[in-house]
Image: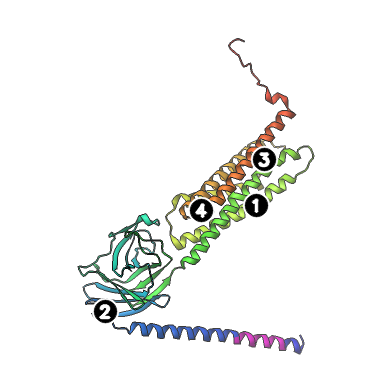
Amino acid sequence: MGPISRLQELLLVVILIIVVSGRSNNVEAQNTEVAQDTKALCSISLASFLPPPYGAMENVICRPLWNSNFLLRYSQTKDNVVTIVASTLYTSGWVGIGFSRNGKMINSSSMVGWITPEGKARIRQYLLEGFKPSQVKHDKGELPLTTTPPLVVLQGATIYLAFQLKFPMRLRAQPIILAFAHRYPHHLRLTNHDDKTTINFDFSTGASYSVSVSPSGIMKTKKTHGVLGIMGWGVFSPIGAIFARYLRHRSRGGGDALWFYLHVSAQFIGFILGLAGVVMGLRLYSRMHAHVPAHRGIGIFLLLISILQVLAFFLRPHEDSKHRKYWNLYHSWVGRIALFFGALNIVLGIHYAEAGDEWRIGYGFLLGSTLLACIILETLLRMKKKLNNPALGRPDFPMNSMDH
């Protein structure tokens, strides 16, 4: 290696060091700016606009929770009474802070507050029984509220949600769900949230040690999961089955195995896409913990029979083997079952995800086109069989057996 090459390597290392050090300096500067903003927000006195006990908390702890402007102020007494004031920037809609047993939205209880367009303050407890708006029940929940009335106050551009809880023991690590929406509730029924996150917050130390993935990332994962499932089970797998069913009869007698390679290629691509869809689904479940047992169970079932189909491909008997006809029956019928449950699971996935009309119309058109193509090809195939073998069109037994 010559001196020029060594000099180039040295210059490359220097450039990398400069880039890395510049990024680290930017990160440090951002962290310092966030800390200064948090300190300024936490220094705001609540006593001027919040009545006791919210405006006069002792030993108050103030911590940023989300997006550097969603703050949590709280104090905890020896009697396990926790006074909470959550604040964030506000323009319209509602803001909520929820408590969950396991970090999931299902069966969590939340305090939700908003200021109506008429300027009236509203705060309610909600129980999240499901993901649909109709399953979010107002004036229900498991939060141990004290007799101190909860409050919601708009001070400048910041909204404050204040409430007090009493627990049987000291509150320590607790999953907290934060969410907001820009649309107002309709007759106390919450509109869909625009964004949310989950934080594991330790009330004994004031530290947050885990933050969930943002809904924007979850939405991208949802779409990726859906696209992979539709492409794998709604496009390539049906096309592979069509190749095997209708092109095989065209190539018989000529020794042309084009249908076989097309069938294997399409099914292999469908298997890979379906497998990737299952992986994305499991990843999505680990983030959302959505309660969709039917969709999840069918997905795992499809993965298992897909693996069996791949193994059967490598273990298929020779064409002259007496076991080949049984293998053909197994392979074809398991394939049909897989295609049926694949289509069913796509429909269930679109339903559970509450996807838009474009997903329903798009897959409906795809499924309808596939079924129509199969009907036409099957009709042509049966007509061709009758023309090639007229005996197939005649019964093998007398139609009027009684007279005979």
Is residue 17 located in the magenta-colored stretch of the structure? yes
Q: Residue at 63% x, 16% y: name it.
A: 398
In the image: residue 361, left or right of residue 46: right
Of labels 3 and 2, earlier in sequence is 2
Q: Is residue 227 above or below residue 73?
A: above
| Residue type for callout 1 | Phe
Q: Secondary structure at mark 1?
A: helix
**Residue projecting furthest to the right:** 254
Disc 4 and disc 2 in contact, CB within 8 angstroms: no
Q: Nearer the viewer, mark 3 or mark 1?
A: 3
The image position of residue 100, as x and y in percent, is: 35, 64
The residue that disc 4 covers is: 357
Q: Quadrant of the N terminus?
A: bottom right
User: Which quadrant of the figure has residue 254?
Assistant: top right
Which amino acid type corresponds to the residue marked 2 in the rendered image?
Answer: Phe
Can you identify the residue that label 2 sits on? 49
Residue at label 3? 245
Horizontally, residue 206 falls left or right of residue 396, namely: left
Tell me which numbered mark, 3 or 1, is placed earlier along the sequence. 3
Q: Secondary structure at mark 2?
A: loop
Q: Which residue is mark 1?
A: 268
Q: Amino acid at mark 3?
A: Arg
Q: Give the magenta-colored segment's residue range.
A: 7-18
